[in-house]
Amino acid sequence: MSDSLHTLVRDLRLRRGRERRGLALAEGVRLVEEALAARVTIRQVLTSPALETTPRGRALKAAVLRTGHASEQVSDRVFGDLAATEHPQGILAVVEPPRFGLADLVVGPRAPVLVLDGVQDPGNVGTMVRTAFALGAAGVVALPGTAELTNPKTLRASMGACFRLPFVPLDEPAFREWAANHKVRVLVAAADGPPPDRQNPQLVAIAVGNEGAGVGASLASWAAGRIGIPLRAGAESLNVGVAAGILLYEVTRE
């Protein structure tokens, strides 16, 4: 493998490298399949013999070659040194993640925006992007302190939804201005909040917060209201990803 590609892959394992280059690593059969399907710009594909041990892997390699993407094969040992996963599947791609803006957030009565306020765990962020896409959300707004979308763990947990669903990093003042201009009611997820009102669909943004501290006091101070999930006696709370999924389902279903 060329030294330049080796250096690039290692650099993209770091946040500062991803931010400087505007690139990310999509690792694994499913994620590269989704990148191809979503027509994400792919700069380089790296494979190892492990990819060809399954029919799905062989089909993916053929698709990469057929579409003309630059591809290089290395040994399983070298690939394992560069991979971020414990059990590498023999393929990773250097991709240009889609760049979304506020104009891409098309909110509807049953198409809410999910707001992540300081959600630090990349796995939770990726899971919520995947869930939001599956349930028909308009997109995701990531406030400061939230794990970046291009984090390899975030990308893998999103299962490709990150390539299709608008994901907009934003500071709180800009989000507040956008919500006011578009008449979007911001509802903060809270343990004592009322359940969603399915009979009266509105333009809403559901804000979930840090895994330990919840939504910040600043956002909570100007939000239009709260929203919650009734829990059985003795249950203290839900994982933030699970809670977001339930709330999105309640808001989006007929």
Image: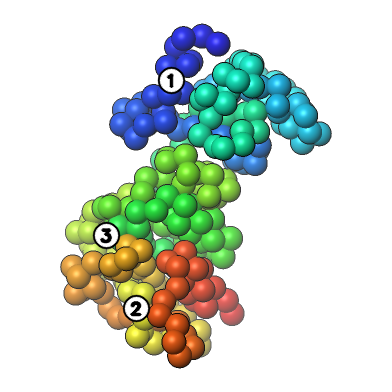
The residue tagged 1 is 8
Q: Can you tell which of label 1 and label 3 is closer to the viewer?
A: 1
Q: Earlier in the sequence, mark 2 or mark 1?
A: 1
Query: Can you tell which mark lies on residue 190?
Result: 2
What amino acid does circle 3 point to?
Answer: Phe
**Residue 218 visible in the current orientation:** yes
| Quadrant position of the C terminus in the picture | bottom right
The residue tagged 3 is 175
Q: Earlier in the sequence, mark 2 or mark 3?
A: 3
Contact between marks 2 and 3 (CB within 8 A): the answer is no
Q: Position of residue 29 (x, y in %)?
A: 66, 37
Q: Can you tell which of label 2 and label 3 is closer to the viewer?
A: 2
What amino acid does circle 2 point to?
Answer: Ala
- Residue at image point 42% right, 50% down: 122
SS of the residue under disc 3: helix
Q: Position of residue 217 (x, y in %)?
A: 20, 70
Q: Position of residue 182 (x, y in %)?
A: 32, 66
